[in-house]
Image (cartoon, grey):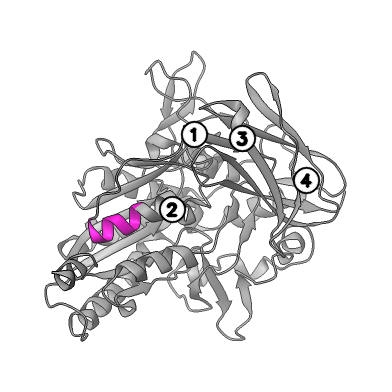
C-alpha cells in the first residue's frame, strides 16, 4: 500500500520549465563572455549607469532577419538580476527544485533557457524541438512512462512562448498541463511606458539606457498591452495600437506582430491552463499618450465600479489570465512570483494533483519602493497590509552578500505604513515586507552614485 501511495504521488510526465523575460543567462557565442545573468550583482550598477556593458544585448539586423546564434542562452537565471522599471529578477533554483522533487526522476525535468531578446514565435519554434526530444527521451527512460505527456511550467513571457507552441505549432496535443506564473496574456502597460520618454520627456540615465535597449527588442514588444488601456479625453479607453508604439519610439512592425499574436491567442481556449496570478502590488493598468510620451496609471480601464485591480507590480491581475479562467492568487511581486512559497506549493500540488488544503495567512501585502536611488540619500518604503497595517515588518538586504543591512521603522500614515531606508553605498538591494502568514513580498532597488 505504501509503495502504491508513493507511486501515485509523483508526476510521471515530462516537465519543461520556462523562465520569463531576462530570466535566462545569455553568453556571446564566439567568446563565451556572459552578457546577462552575471554572478556579481554589482555589475548591474555599472551596466545601467556607465560603459557599454549592454551594447552586445541590442538586437542586430541579422538577428531581426532570423540569422541568430551570435548570442546563446545557456541556463536559467542562477543569480538575482535587475533592470530599471522592470525591477528585480529572481533565480529559478527553487522552482527547478520543486519540479524535480515532484517528478518521478530528476531527468524528467528540462530547464529551457532561451534568448529572451527575440520574438515569441522564434522561441516557440525552438521549444517545439526541445519539448519533442525531451518527451521522447523521457518515455524511453527507465523511470519514465510510455503514456507520459508534457507539463509546462512557465514564468512571465515564458507562458506566451508555451501558449504559442501549443496553439500555433500543434503542441497542445502532447501537453497535459500548462502552469503559468505571472504571464501577461493581455500584455502590460509597463512595456508601453518603457518605450516612451515619460512625463516631461526626461529620464535618469538607467531609464534612458533601458529605453534604448527596449526599443529594438522583439521580446519587449511581445509584452505590449493588447486590451483597451489607452485613456482618452472624456474618460474613454481604446486599444493600444502598433502606431502608438511607433509614436513612443518603438518598432511598428514588431508591435503589430505581437498584438496580432495576442489577438490570435484570445481565440483559443487552453483547457490545460493553471494560471498563478500575483496580486496586492501597485500595478500600471492604463496609460495616457500625449506628444510621444507615456504616462502609466493605476486605474482599471473598465466600467466595473472597481478603480484599482492591483497585480504583481508588472502585470495587472486581469491581464495575467485569459477571460473566464479561475486563477490561483498570490500576494507577490512579478520577479519573485516564481520563487514564493505559495506559488511553489501550487506548482508541486498541480504536478502531483495533491489538494493544497486551506490557505494560511491573512490578507494581501503590497510593497512599494523606488527602482533607482542615489547612494547616501534616504528613500521611501511603503507597505500596505490589507488585513491590518499594524502587523507588517520590513527588512533590507545587500543582494551581493545576502546580508541584512537595516530594518526600516514603519509608521502608520493615511492607512498605510511608511518608513525610510538609507544604504550607504552603491549596489543592488533587496527589500522584503511581511505580514501575517504569507511569505515576504520582495522588490529590488538599484543604488547608484549621486548624479
The CA distance from mark 1 to mark 4 is 26 Å
Disc 4 designates what residue?
Answer: 373
Disc 3 designates what residue?
Answer: 392
Local SS, label 3 = strand
In the rendered image, residue 18, in percent from the top left (x then y), is placed at 39, 64
Badge 1 or badge 2: first in the primary sequence = 2
On screen, residue 352 versus residue 393, left or right, reads left
- Above-or-below relation of 255 to 129: above
Find residue 1 and report its image quarter: bottom left
Find residue 53 and report its image quarter: bottom right
The CA distance from mark 2 to mark 3 is 28 Å
Q: Which of marks 1 and 4 is in front?
A: 1
Disc 1 designates what residue?
Answer: 364
In the rendered image, residue 423, in percent from the top left (x then y), is placed at 81, 50
Examine the rendering and report whether any part of residue 260 can be seen: no
Badge 4: residue crowd in 10 Å (few <14, some 14–19, many ≥20): many
Q: What stretch is highlighted in magenta?
A: 346-353
Disc 2 designates what residue?
Answer: 156
In the depicted view, which residue is nearer to us: 412 or 360?
360
Q: Nearer the viewer, mark 3 or mark 4?
A: 3
In the depicted view, which residue is nearer to us: 395 or 93?
395
Badge 1: residue crowd in 10 Å (few <14, some 14–19, many ≥20): many
In the rendered image, residue 146, in percent from the top left (x then y), is placed at 12, 78
- Above-or-below relation of 251 to 153: above
- Identify the residue at horizontal 62%, vertical 27% (top origin): 390
Badge 3 or badge 4: first in the primary sequence = 4
In the depicted view, which residue is nearer to us: 326 or 316?
326
Amino acid at each position: 500500500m505504501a509503495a502504491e501511495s508513493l507511486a501515485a504521488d509523483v508526476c510521471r510526465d515530462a516537465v519543461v520549465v520556462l523562465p520569463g523575460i531576462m530570466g535566462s543567462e545569455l553568453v556571446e557565442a564566439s567568446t563565451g563572455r556572459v552578457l546577462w545573468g552575471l554572478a556579481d550583482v554589482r555589475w548591474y550598477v555599472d551596466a545601467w549607469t556607465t560603459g557599454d556593458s549592454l551594447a552586445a544585448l541590442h538586437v542586430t539586423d541579422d538577428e531581426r532577419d532570423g540569422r541568430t546564434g551570435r548570442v546563446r542562452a545557456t541556463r536559467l537565471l542562477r543569480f538575482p538580476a535587475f533592470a530599471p522599471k522592470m525591477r528585480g529578477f529572481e533565480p529559478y533554483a527553487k522552482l527547478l527544485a520543486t519540479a524535480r522533487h515532484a517528478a518521478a526522476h530528476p531527468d524528467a525535468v528540462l530547464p529551457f533557457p532561451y534568448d529572451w531578446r527575440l520574438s515569441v514565435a522564434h522561441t516557440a519554434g525552438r521549444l517545439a524541438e526541445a519539448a519533442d526530444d525531451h518527451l521522447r527521451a523521457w518515455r524511453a527512460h527507465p523511470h519514465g512512462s510510455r503514456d507520459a505527456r508534457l507539463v509546462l511550467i512557465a514564468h512571465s513571457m515564458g507562458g506566451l512562448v508555451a501558449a504559442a507552441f501549443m496553439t500555433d505549432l500543434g503542441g497542445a496535443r502532447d501537453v497535459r498541463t500548462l502552469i503559468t506564473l505571472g504571464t501577461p496574456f493581455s500584455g502590460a502597460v509597463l512595456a508601453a511606458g518603457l518605450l516612451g520618454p515619460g512625463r516631461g520627456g526626461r529620464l535618469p540615465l538607467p531609464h534612458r539606457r533601458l529605453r534604448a535597449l527596449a526599443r529594438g527588442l522583439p521580446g519587449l514588444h511581445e509584452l505590449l498591452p493588447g486590451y483597451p488601456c489607452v485613456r482618452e479625453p472624456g474618460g474613454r479607453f481604446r486599444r493600444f495600437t502598433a502606431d502608438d508604439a511607433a509614436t513612443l519610439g518603438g518598432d511598428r512592425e514588431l508591435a503589430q506582430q505581437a498584438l496580432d499574436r495576442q489577438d490570435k491567442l484570445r481565440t483559443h481556449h487552453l483547457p490545460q491552463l493553471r494560471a498563478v496570478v500575483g496580486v496586492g502590488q501597485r500595478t500600471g493598468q492604463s496609460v495616457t499618450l500625449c506628444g510621444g510620451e507615456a504616462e502609466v496609471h493605476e486605474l482599471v480601464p473598465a466600467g466595473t465600479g472597481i478603480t484599482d485591480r492591483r497585480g504583481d507590480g508588472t502585470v495587472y491581475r486581469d491581464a495575467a489570465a485569459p477571460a473566464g479562467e479561475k486563477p490561483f492568487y498570490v500576494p507577490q511581486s512579478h520577479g519573485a512570483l516564481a520563487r514564493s512559497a505559495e506559488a511553489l506549493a501550487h506548482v508541486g500540488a498541480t504536478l502531483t494533483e495533491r489538494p493544497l488544503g486551506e490557505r494560511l495567512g491573512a490578507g494581501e501585502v503590497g510593497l512599494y519602493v523606488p527602482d533607482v536611488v542615489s547612494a547616501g540619500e534616504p528613500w521611501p518604503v511603503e507597505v500596505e497590509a490589507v488585513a491590518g497595517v499594524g502587523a507588517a515588518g520590513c527588512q533590507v538586504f545587500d543582494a551581493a552578500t545576502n546580508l541584512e543591512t537595516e530594518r526600516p521603522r514603519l509608521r502608520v500614515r493615511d492607512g498605510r505604513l511608511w518608513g525610510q531606508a538609507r544604504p550607504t553605498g552603491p549596489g543592488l538591494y533587496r527589500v522584503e515586507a511581511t505580514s501575517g502568514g504569507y511569505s515576504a513580498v520582495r522588490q529590488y532597488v538599484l543604488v547608484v552614485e549621486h548624479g
